[in-house]
């Protein structure tokens, strides 16, 4: 039974949650209604078979002219120039443009993978041995159709991945409404094939495409060939391909939607492709889509949805992309607009090349710092080194730990500096992160909070980190996370907005440490009610920022954070954990996720995030395979490298030290000085473990949690390091370190 103070504390937490959630729910509903209206920009109304008339020409049955898509695997914005590709530049000037993430099941999207993904509306691949599989030539049939040889093997090759593409989606959705689809070239045939590999209308090459072919069907796919890797051949190919694009654009009928897209990679390095769309709905500005929520950035799967919607065909749920639309904000100077598009790939390449180096240096530096300080402390005690030297070591350790703890926030804030525009972007990025981390660590060390509490300096860093992440997803559109060292990669393309698993882990540790420190500060002054309210407010902000579909849109993060915050809240309220309270915690976490997911589902199919789509999958009975794939990915994370063994051992070590803090004297002293500190670390460990079990990144979540939480704890405990002769003196020291 919860009685007395505990009962009042629980009701106050509920009241705080209600006060914080009510305005957010109202804002959510308002934004959802407005978002549905905004989503209609550039999207044709849904059509059914009853709306179609077989007597009318196929191209005239949509709201606009035909849709013509020219695929050119390997085309990047750096290839498009005013003099070298004048036809593409002309399309850029009068149409809408974006960089396109072309990720397929493999990190590098081979040309055949790009075409298969376009046809399936979901990431798809062909079997690859060494390098990319050659594009098979369609086999002409006696009835005038064509067939893709070995299509069954292509379909079976996707069983090893979790995307479950519906092969033939584009062709099936077009033909079931009495319309037709024309494919020119072998790559286009891959996208235009139905579920059996049959292509109803096939033209062998672009040279055979005439004006009649462009108007014969409402959708025409054209394979312009893959851009070669060799620089010399690349320039010559682009010149020829540009002339073909110009001829086809000139032959396209009035009212046609004309799209040129670099739908895949060609070389061994993944890149962002270029995409340009012209037509009634694309007359300037950036291209954008709900799948990315960033102007000037779309995904390959968005192209499938756009082709269907522009042709007046309802987009099925199996097409995971979003319909592309035109948005503003594009510079009137086309050279500036082109530069911004090309620089997105520069940013993506820089993060891909240097993120690993950054993390290795950060971790090695942290380990080296701890090892050197421990060694020097031991020598100072054994050889009775001058006391001054021993007293400096805690300061060095504290400063170094705060620097490491500041790295995540500094890496996000670095995106306030347009480092991707520099001639050498990597050094500029590194300098921005380095300076940011130094400034934050200096503020943590020199600010007044260092005198307020033992956890004050570390809490400052944690609070800044929490604020940066929450502000970025709520008002910044995730711009600080996109193409950042700890954030979202446009090449990996796991997501483009909200919280990925890495950012979730950072937010969870930073927010819970902030709540712990502020609650401890209030408890030291006898203000338990204020401490409870503080935990409730920070928990509400963090959970809403992480889980709300318009913000973080993180499904598993809510399940992991709610129990951790609740454990901290119980400790602050002075109550022990029981079986009943444990059940309440689990129910609260589940209720929070269900509520957010259902609200997202109510927004309608065109506006749902993956949380709302999962609710629909439960309704349709398709949720089982999704859960199975997530669990499989989580289990596999333990087998991808040595971290699958090292990280669980480190988690076990942390648990052991929390249970036996006497094994680490400075930790024992910290627990004595800050009674709620131990419970706060248990709460953080709980969130880390749940994050592993719930997220498909698995053990990588715990790795990030440890790299964030460890320097915060070390920075807090560092002032308590002492030589044996100093222990009695330190035991009597004031509660607030100087």
Image (cartoon, rainbow, N blue to C red):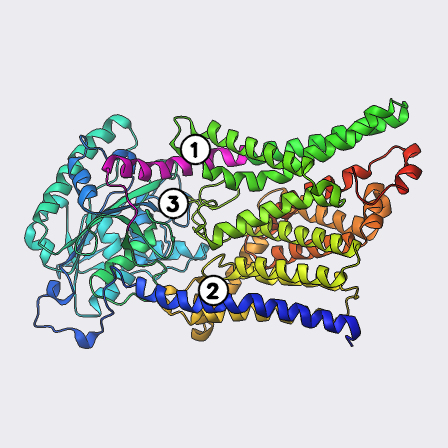
Drawn side of residue 103 relative to residue 624, left or right:
left
Q: Nearer the viewer, residue 313 or 8?
A: 8
N-term mark: 3 or 2: 3
> Which of the two marks, 3 or 2, is nearer to us in this view?
2
Residue 120 part of the magenta segment? no
* Number of disc labels: 3
- Which secondary structure lies at badge 2? helix
Inter-mark Cα distance, 1 to 3: 37 Å
Q: The C terminus is located in which quarter?
A: top right
User: Would you place residue 716 above or below residue 599 in this image?
Assistant: above
In the rendered structure, find residue 419 and report the number of the disc placed on it: 1
- Which secondary structure lies at badge 3? loop
Inter-mark Cα distance, 3 to 2: 33 Å
> Which of the two marks, 1 or 3, is nearer to us in this view?
1
Drawn side of residue 354 relative to residue 132, left or right:
right
Can residue 497 be seen by looking at this rendering?
Answer: yes
Q: Say which residue label 3 marks.
A: 128
Q: Nearer the viewer, residue 324 or 271?
A: 324
N-term mark: 1 or 2: 1
User: Would you place residue 386 above or below residue 662 in this image?
Assistant: above
The spot of residue 285 in percent (x, y) is 25, 48
Q: Residue at x 32, y 58 (%)?
A: 120
> Could you classify mark 2 by the number of other residues whose Cα lies within 10 Å: few (under 14), some (14-19), or many (20 or more)?
many
- Which secondary structure lies at badge 1? helix
Residue 350 part of the magenta segment? yes
Q: Say which residue label 2 marks.
A: 611
Q: The N terminus is located in which quarter?
A: bottom right
N-term mark: 1 or 3: 3
The spot of residue 25 in percent (x, y) is 49, 68
The residue stretch that appears in magenta: 328-357
């Amino acid at each position: 039974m919860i009685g007395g103070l505990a009962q009042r504390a629980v009701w106050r937490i509920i009241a705080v949650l209600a006060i914080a959630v009510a305005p957010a729910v109202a804002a959510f509903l308002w934004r959802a209604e407005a978002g549905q209206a905004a989503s209609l920009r550039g999207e044709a109304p849904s059509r059914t078979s009853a709306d179609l008339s077989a007597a009318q020409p196929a191209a005239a049955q949509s709201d606009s002219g035909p849709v013509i898509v020219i695929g050119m695997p390997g085309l990047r914005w750096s290839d498009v120039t005013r003099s070298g590709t004048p036809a593409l530049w002309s399309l850029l000037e009068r149409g809408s443009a974006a960089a396109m993430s072309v990720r397929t099941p493999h990190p590098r999207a081979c040309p055949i993978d790009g075409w298969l993904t376009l046809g399936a509306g979901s990431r798809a691949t062909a079997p690859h041995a060494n390098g990319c599989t050659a594009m098979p030539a369609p086999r002409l049939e006696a009835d005038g159709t064509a067939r893709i040889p070995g299509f069954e093997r292509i379909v079976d090759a996707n069983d090893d991945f979790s995307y479950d593409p519906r092969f033939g989606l584009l062709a099936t959705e077009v033909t079931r409404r009495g319309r037709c689809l024309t494919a020119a070239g072998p790559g286009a045939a891959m996208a235009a094939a139905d579920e059996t590999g049959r292509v109803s209308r096939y033209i062998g090459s672009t040279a055979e495409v005439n004006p009649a072919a462009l108007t014969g069907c409402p959708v025409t796919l054209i394979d312009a060939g893959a851009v070669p890797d060799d620089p010399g051949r690349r320039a010559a190919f682009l010149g020829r391909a540009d002339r073909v694009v110009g001829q086809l654009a000139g032959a396209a009928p009035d009212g046609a939607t004309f799209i040129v897209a670099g739908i895949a990679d060609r070389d061994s390095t993944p890149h962002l492709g270029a995409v340009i769309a012209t037509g009634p709905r694309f007359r300037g500005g950036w291209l954008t889509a709900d799948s990315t929520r960033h102007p000037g950035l779309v995904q390959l799967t968005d192209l499938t949805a756009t082709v269907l919607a522009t042709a007046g065909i309802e987009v099925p749920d199996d097409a995971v992309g979003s319909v592309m639309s035109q948005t503003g904000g594009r510079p009137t100077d086309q050279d500036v607009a082109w530069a911004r598009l090309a620089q997105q790939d520069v940013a993506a390449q820089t993060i891909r090349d240097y993120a690993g180096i950054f993390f290795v240096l950060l971790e090695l530096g942290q380990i080296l710092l701890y090892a050197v300080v421990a060694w020097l402390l031991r020598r100072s005690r054994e050889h009775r080194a001058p006391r001054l030297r021993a007293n400096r070591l805690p300061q060095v350790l504290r400063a170094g730990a705060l620097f490491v703890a500041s790295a995540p926030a500094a890496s996000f804030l670095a995106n306030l500096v347009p480092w991707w525009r520099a001639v050498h972007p990597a050094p500029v990025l590194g300098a921005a992160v380095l300076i940011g981390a130094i400034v934050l660590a200096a503020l943590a060390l020199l600010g007044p909070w260092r005198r307020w509490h033992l956890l004050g300096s570390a809490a400052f860093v944690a609070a800044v980190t929490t604020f940066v992440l929450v502000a970025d997803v709520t008002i910044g559109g995730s711009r600080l996370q996109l193409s950042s060292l700890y954030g979202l990669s446009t090449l990996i393309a796991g997501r483009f907005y909200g919280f990925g698993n890495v950012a979730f882990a950072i937010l969870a540790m930073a927010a819970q440490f902030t709540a712990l420190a502020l609650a401890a500060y209030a408890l030291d002054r006898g203000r338990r009610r204020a401490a409870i309210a503080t935990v409730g407010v920070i928990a509400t902000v963090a959970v809403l920022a992480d889980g709300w579909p318009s913000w973080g849109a993180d499904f598993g993060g809510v399940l992991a954070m709610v129990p951790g915050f609740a454990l901290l809240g119980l400790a602050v309220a002075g109550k022990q954990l029981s079986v009943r309270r444990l059940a309440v915690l689990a129910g609260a976490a589940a209720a929070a996720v269900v509520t957010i997911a259902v609200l997202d589902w109510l927004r309608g199919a065109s506006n749902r995030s993956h949380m709302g789509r999962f609710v629909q999958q439960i309704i349709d009975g398709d949720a089982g395979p999704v859960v199975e794939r997530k669990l499989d990915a989580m289990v596999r994370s333990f087998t991808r490298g040595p971290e699958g063994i090292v990280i669980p051992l480190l988690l076990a070590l942390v648990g052991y030290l929390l249970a036996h803090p006497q094994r680490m004297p400075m930790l024992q002293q910290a627990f004595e000085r800050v009674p709620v500190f131990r419970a706060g670390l248990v709460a953080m460990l709980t969130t880390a473990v749940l994050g592993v079990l719930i997220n498909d990144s698995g053990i990588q979540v715990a790795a990030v949690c440890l790299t964030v939480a460890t320097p915060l704890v070390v920075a807090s405990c560092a002032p308590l390091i002492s030589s044996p002769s100093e222990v009695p003196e330190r035991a009597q020291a004031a509660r607030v370190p100087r």
